[in-house]
């Protein structure tokens, strides 16, 4: 009976692994809520531990114990499910925090890892490939877990995340060497070379501001004629837009000469998280064909609110033309942006108030 089940499994292994990968992806998209919730972090940690166990069992433990030799045949299912859940979780959280205009290369890497792990079936069984994917998972997790724990972001926090990831990977390699010294003697240098390469690529993406500023995420942003703060929230005054403006991309704001404009934003941050963000006002010069900075307005935000920390900046001396406001961290990582056109008119358009 067992041999019959084993035979059927071997024939359907690739399809079963695909289903396991898909199940992990779907579960994450349905269940993951906030990056600072305990259950979400327990789930991601469980994915990493399961992947470690699957890799160890396939390549080392099966040589030491009869039970593990039996389990070895089913470990690809475990690792596929773990990697599917792990990288879909990263994609969910990183994409929520990403401004696609600057962070798409990193998101593309996450997608490539997910797809490559699934479709390059034979290569995905190799020890070097699996340990490389595992380390990328550990590093990606540390990049957003460490800021959540310490309550801030920055270059030093990123470097701490890298060091912690390298320490974990070093312990994994030492543990593997203990169980299978002859196997690891041949593979150790390749594992370290793969690890260093991943660190170099991810560090380059970070310092070029391509990795999203996780755990920060833009929940909402808009351009308004005025913003006023009350005891319960904000009162936003905007012009009434025609229905087609919500279908056609682009937004045009009509103002009278000398009027100011405000950009209001809501940025999510985890509980007990404090940092500063910047509203950078930029104007598009038609002759040069590029945007120029006209103002930078920093302000502090505090985490914990589901809808995000709300704040605004106001710009005077607004002229006709194309404008955008980039919402960034102090390190220059883009959280999001709002782009709009300004037209100067003689009569003010119909206005309405919104309470946030």
Image (cartoon, rainbow, N blue to C red):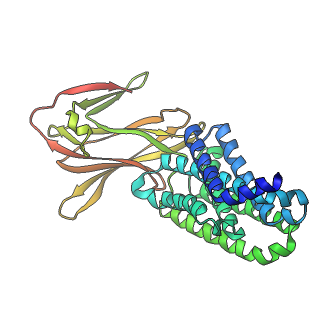
Closer to the camera in the image, 82 or 3: 3
Image x and y of residue 326, in percent? 37, 50
Question: Which residue is outermost to the left?
Answer: 346
Residue 52 visible to the viewer:
no
- Residue found at x 69% / y 69%: 126
Give residue 10's quadrant in the image: bottom right
Q: Is residue 252 above or below residue 167?
A: above
Q: Number of marks in the image?
A: 0
- Residue found at x 75% / y 58%: 7
Q: Is residue 187 above or below residue 106?
A: below
State which quarter of the image contains the C terminus. Answer: top left
Closer to the camera in the image, 288 or 300: 288
Residue 337 visible to the viewer:
yes
Image x and y of residue 167, in percent? 74, 61
Q: Is residue 322 above or below residue 162?
A: above
Question: Which residue is outermost to the right?
Answer: 65
Image x and y of residue 265, in percent? 39, 38
- Residue found at x 41% / y 54%: 100
Instruction: Left or right? Give the position of 216 relative to 137.
Output: left
Image x and y of residue 234, in percent? 38, 27
């Amino acid at each position: 009976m067992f041999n019959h089940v084993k035979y059927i499994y071997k024939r359907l292994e690739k399809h079963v692994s695909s289903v396991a990968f898909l199940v992990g992806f779907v579960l994450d998209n349905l269940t993951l809520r906030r990056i600072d919730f305990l259950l979400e972090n327990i789930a991601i940690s469980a994915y990493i531990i399961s992947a470690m166990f699957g890799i160890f069992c396939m390549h080392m433990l099966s040589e030491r114990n009869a039970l593990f030799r039996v389990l070895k045949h089913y470990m690809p299912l475990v690792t596929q499910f773990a990697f599917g859940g792990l990288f879909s979780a990263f994609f969910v959280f990183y994409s929520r925090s990403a401004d696609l205009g600057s962070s798409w290369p990193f998101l593309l890497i996450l997608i490539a890892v997910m797809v490559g792990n699934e479709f390059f079936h034979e290569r995905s069984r190799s020890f070097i490939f699996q340990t490389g994917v595992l380390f990328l998972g550990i590093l990606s997790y540390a990049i957003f877990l460490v800021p959540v724990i310490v309550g801030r972001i920055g270059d030093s926090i990123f470097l701490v995340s890298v060091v912690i990831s390298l320490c974990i990977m070093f312990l994994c390699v030492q543990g593997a060497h203990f169980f299978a010294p002859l196997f690891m003697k041949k593979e150790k240098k390749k594992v370290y070379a793969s690890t260093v390469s991943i660190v170099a690529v991810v560090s380059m993406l970070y310092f070029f501001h391509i990795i999203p500023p996780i755990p920060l995420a833009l929940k909402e942003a808009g351009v308004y004629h005025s913003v006023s703060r009350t005891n319960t929230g904000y009162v936003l005054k905007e012009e009434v837009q025609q229905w087609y403006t919500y279908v056609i991309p682009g937004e045009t704001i009509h103002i009278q000469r000398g009027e100011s404009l405000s950009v209001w934003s809501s940025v999510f941050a985890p509980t007990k998280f404090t940092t500063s963000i910047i509203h950078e006002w930029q104007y598009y010069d038609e002759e040069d064909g590029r945007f120029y900075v006209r103002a930078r307005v920093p302000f502090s935000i505090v985490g914990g609110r589901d809808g995000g920390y709300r704040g605004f900046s106001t710009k005077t001396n607004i002229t006709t033309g194309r404008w955008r406001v980039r919402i960034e961290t102090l390190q220059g990582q883009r959280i999001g942006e709002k782009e709009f056109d300004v037209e100067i008119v003689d009569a003010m358009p119909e206005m309405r108030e919104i309470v946030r």
